[in-house]
Image: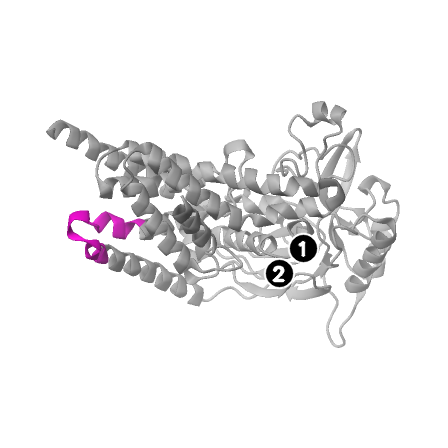
Amino acid sequence: MAFDLALGALAALGQAPWNLWFLALAALALLCWRIARARDPRQAFWHALAAGFGQFAIAMSWIVEPFLVEPERYGWMAPFALVLTASGGALFWALPGWLSARLESGLAARGAAFAAFMVLSDWLRGWIFTGLPWSLTGHIWIGTPADQLAASFGAIGLSALTMLTAVLPVIFLRQDRGPRTALPGAILSALVIATVWSAGLARLAQPVPPDRPIQLRLIQPNATQALKWDPYWSEIFFRRLLELSAARDPGRPGPDAVIWPETAVSFLLEQSGSAPQDIANHVGAPVILGIQRGEGSRYFNSLTEFSRNGIGEIYDKFHLVPFGEYTPWGDQLSAFGIRAFAAQHGFGYSPGPAPRILRFSALPPVQPLICYEAVFSRHLISGPNRPEWLLQVTNDGWFGQLSGPWQHLAQAQLRAIESGLPLMRAANTGVSAVLDGHGRIRAQLGLGVTGRIDAALPSALPPTPWSRWGDWPAVLAALACIAGALSHRMLTARRR
């Protein structure tokens, strides 16, 4: 068990901000071997459960941060949150271990089945209980040329790459002949990585359309979460937003639009009065911002535009964070004083209707993603009416200063690669960034930095293969692998 925990912890080091993908790959290869040689499904289950716990305990250690914003009130919950999150994630590793061991059809088939089940598990994690596709095995490639594979096969395709290259040495291994028999599989694994890496470099080297003649300004006010809603400090943060937005550089034209982060202001949209016009006049450009709004007894985490004409189109976040922005069965639990953390009004936010494309003043059509929504590739709008860019406004102050904000940024990079669309990211405390359609970071502001980014809007790339067929090729490949393992088992049983 201790060895499996250590393997999981090593696998977590492939995630941002550590990005040690080679350590993660080695750890997953050893785990595949441990699962393949388990004496029974129960032992395989415990091997995978322990490794999964180690992985999620390290990779998602940032989950304690929201409870430390008000430690005197919620601090006691932090260790429970980490244990429960790691345990829940571990089950998504343990079940593939148990299922693959049930095949009982030899080292190679069992290892391959485990790898395939892990790919399916990563996919299902994006759907079950509203989904949490965080810390996928495929995320270890983000920031390397191999991440360009996501343009064809998405994040789940990257998971397939991870598990394929991890299991190949196990497939070739012959226990009766010693560990040297795994060498051909290791060489083949290296060749697969080299091929994908080279293809990624080739894609990155292709000419890209020139940037749009549109200048955008991203504002990072660095409003510390513990002080964000304090009346005294919220006034300071608001003035900081205005000063950064209205600043002018000698010899450079002003921005065509300014973008503020999620829940940028302390007042509700319906209480804004003349603020939209006043802010736009002061800044000298329209301002796109995250703001809360109420509608009867319901409250929404929203995004809109403030311009000289008033309030523009409104988008309401529809994929909310469970227990962060809403509490399941919240209307009933509110009677006991149980409410969501992030919502500042009522007992949580209500979801908006669906993803949508907005059209702001003099800007190309855009799909907004508020914070957590950028974690889900399935929410990206594709087809003939796809947007021309993506906009993420977020308040990563909840995620602390360690791994969480960097992992969130990495997943935004994947959304840009999958869609081929540039992504502008305005984060309250960081990391704000400009991403092109290849997911490359053109500019960024680090954690805990107060500042602004002025940048041209990159042009969209042509629709990617992934935007046409989604995750299905990777999912079907995993299912085919499992079907092959089952067929092998049936043939072996007949021979007996």
In the foreground, 379 or 82: 82
In the picture provided, is 357 more to the left or to the right than 265? Answer: left
Q: What residue is disc 2 on?
A: 433
- Secondary structure, mark 2, is strand
Q: Are marks 1 and 2 in contact (CB under 8 Å)?
A: yes
The mark found on residue 462 in the picture is none
For the point 26% across and 49% down, the residue is 170
Query: Measuring 61% from the left and 42% from the top, which residue is drawn there?
Result: 79
Give percent across and percent down for residue 292.
76, 42
> Label 1 crowding class (10 Å Cα cut-off): few <14, some 14-19, many 20+?
many
Q: Label 2 is placed on what type of residue?
A: Ala
In the picture, measured across the screen, residue 393 lies left or right of residue 161, that is: right
Which residue is pictured at 54% across the width and 60% down the height?
436
Q: Which residues are magenta?
A: 167-184
Q: CA distance from mark 1 to mark 2?
A: 8 Å
Q: Secondary structure at mark 1?
A: strand
Which residue in the structure is indicated by mark 1? 427
Front residue (pair 285, 38): 38
Q: Is residue 164 visible?
A: yes
Q: Amino acid at mark 1?
A: Ala
How far across and how far down the image is residue 69, in percent? 72, 48
Q: Is residue 487 magenta?
A: no
